[in-house]
Image: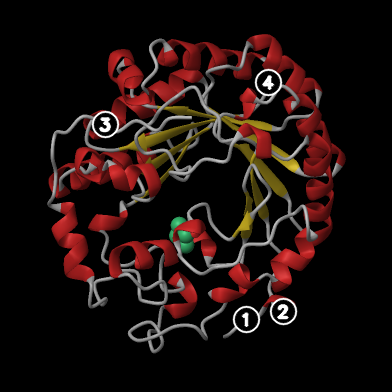
Amino acid sequence: MSTNGASAPAPLGLLAELTHRCPLGCPYCSNPLALDPRSDELDAATWARVFREASALGVLQVHLSGGEPAARRDLPEIVKAARDANLYSNLITSAVGLTAEGLSKLADAGLDHVQISIQDSEPASADHIAGYKGASARKHALAAEVVRLGLPLTVNVVVHRANIARVEAMVEMALALGATRVEIAHVQYYGWALKNRAALMPSRAQVEEAVGIVERLRQAHRGRIVIDAVIPDYYARFPKPCVGGWGRRSLNVTPAGRVLPCHAAEVIPGLEFWNVRAHTLADIWRSSPAFEAFRGTDWMQEPCKSCALKEKDFGGCRCQAFLLAGDARAADPVCHLSPHHATVERLAGERADAAYAYRHS
Ligand code: FES
């Protein structure tokens, strides 16, 4: 099936990157290497309009993200705007820079859900990975406040070589914090993580062991906590249906208002992104060149074009295809059928105990 914007399904989720400012410096940060400056950030009134337009378009959930969204003093106003637009709001926070009082204001404004990222179960390692002394203690304190206020809590764990041996301890930690869901996400190698790839890459043996542990924990904790986990790209045989398929499920609005089909889309040269300052969200979703570029299946080449899975994985990740194969229309090289798959295997083997290049604001 090919799809163009006019017949595209309604998006379900909007990722609102409220700011790129962040006190942490995680070496796998998903923000781009060139960060939007504070002076370019959309104001709260524009976010409120974007939320109304998103709701009218069919969006159900807004993820308030960053950088660190709490770096915005007008965050309660933005949360209220999401509520007024009938969107389910999920705050994705590092928990650093958000006080108990600040959280309580967000709850009063109508916040529905909180997601806190943790870097490791060992505090010293967690602070080292975050590049921020005392980060781990603050995360524990804020998680307790989330639970005390009766808000549902998800703990987000990004796994890589320095912490993969403690997957079990991190799941136990999420349970102890009162989370109802834990997301175990292996590092995705774009942006800052690509820069730090050799320092972050686990070995195949480590990944296989972690996958087995997660499966055991899923069974052991069924009914107590939901464990979401995805196999890391570089050790998979098939690619992931990145963002649920380009222009099918979600939109990502940058702090300065550019609307992207995925958080990393700006790495692909030649794409034209429209801005909410100049267009409605509905226009952008249906007609903007960047969303149209890889929607449906007409853009595919072999081996994707004749693949039985093309409507399931949509050829994998366009950004990864560009970054590893130099062609955003190529099959994601993670796929074992890709002519570039050997590159992925070679890169997975390039591991070095180098110091992190921390992301900086
Ligand atoms: Fe852009 Fe996967 S991150 S399509």
Mark 3 belongs to which amino acid?
Answer: Tyr
- Which x, y percent locates residue 83? 82, 37
Q: Residue at x 38, y 24 (%)?
A: 130
How many other residues sit within 10 Å of disc 4, few (<14), some (14-19) or many (≥20)?
Answer: few
CA–CA distance in space, label 4 to label 1: 42 Å
CA–CA distance in space, label 1 to label 3: 42 Å
Q: Is residue 181 left or right of residue 167?
A: right
Nearer to us of marks 3 and 4 is: 3
- Tag 3 residue: 356
- Tag 1 residue: 3
150 is higher (above) or lower (below) than 256: above
Mark 2 belongs to which amino acid?
Answer: Ser
- Which x, y percent locates residue 182? 46, 35
Q: Give the mark count.
A: 4
Q: Are marks 4 and 1 in contact (CB under 8 Å)?
A: no
- Label 3, ligand 1: CB separation under 8 Å: no
Nearer to us of marks 2 and 3 is: 3
The earlier-in-sequence mark between 4 and 1 is 1
**Under tag 3, what secondary structure?**
loop
CA–CA distance in space, label 1 to label 2: 6 Å
Q: Is residue 327 visible?
A: yes
- Label 1, ligand 1: CB separation under 8 Å: no
- Which x, y percent locates residue 255? 64, 42
- Tag 4 residue: 150
**Under tag 2, what secondary structure?**
helix
The earlier-in-sequence mark between 3 and 4 is 4
Q: Is residue 334 visible?
A: no
Q: Residue at x 51, y 82 (%)?
A: 297
How many other residues sit within 10 Å of disc 2, few (<14), some (14-19) or many (≥20)?
Answer: few
- Label 2, ligand 1: CB separation under 8 Å: no
**Under tag 4, what secondary structure?**
loop
